[in-house]
Image: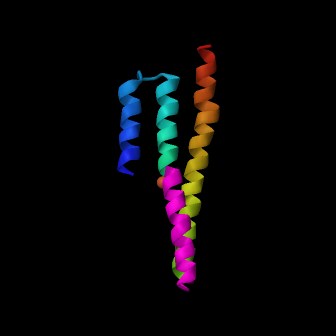
Amino acid sequence: MEGLTKEGEGVIEDTDAGTPARNLGIIMASQKVEHYEISAYAGLIKLAGKLGLDNVAGILSEILAEEQESDQILAGIADNDIAAESNKHN
Ligand SMILES: [Fe+2]
């Protein structure tokens, strides 16, 4: 996770403010964090299930759904808002 955070900081260092490269780079870095979290929660849900901790698995499943929703929101921003802004400059 620390490496992903540094990668995101690198995007900011290497790009100019307000450019599609920076905005999409930040979205990409953010989605990498979400994907990391999704993988972690998916694994923990399986573990909780194996241990018979159904209540815990249920709570983790709710969090997983939130992480997946965050990922979709970020993807939507990249596809719609930033892509549209990028097309204005082409
Ligand atoms: Fe998240």
In the image, taking residue 40 as reference, residue 72 lies left or right, namely right
Q: Nearer the viewer, residue 82 or 43?
A: 43
- Residue 58 drawn at (x, y percent): 57, 75
Membership of 15 in magenta stretch: no
In the image, taking residue 63 as reference, residue 6 lies left or right, namely left
- Residue 63 drawn at (x, y percent): 53, 64
Q: Residue at x 62, y 16 (%)?
A: 88
- The quadrant of the picture occupied by the C terminus is top right
- Residue 62 drawn at (x, y percent): 56, 67
The type of colouring in the image is rainbow
Q: Residue 13: which quarter of the image?
A: top left
Q: Which residues are magenta?
A: 34-54
Q: Residue at x 63, y 19 (%)?
A: 87
Q: Is residue 44 above or below residue 72?
A: below
Q: Is residue 2 above or below residue 26?
A: below
Magenta stretch secondary structure, dominant: helix
Q: Residue at the far top: name it.
A: 90
In the image, taking residue 67 as reference, residue 90 lies left or right, namely right
Q: Residue at x 59, y 37 (%)?
A: 77
Q: Nearer the viewer, residue 50 or 20?
A: 50
Q: Is residue 21 above or below residue 27?
A: above
Q: Is residue 5 above or below residue 48?
A: above
Q: Residue at x 53, y 59 (%)?
A: 39
- Residue 78 drawn at (x, y percent): 59, 35
Membership of 47 in magenta stretch: yes
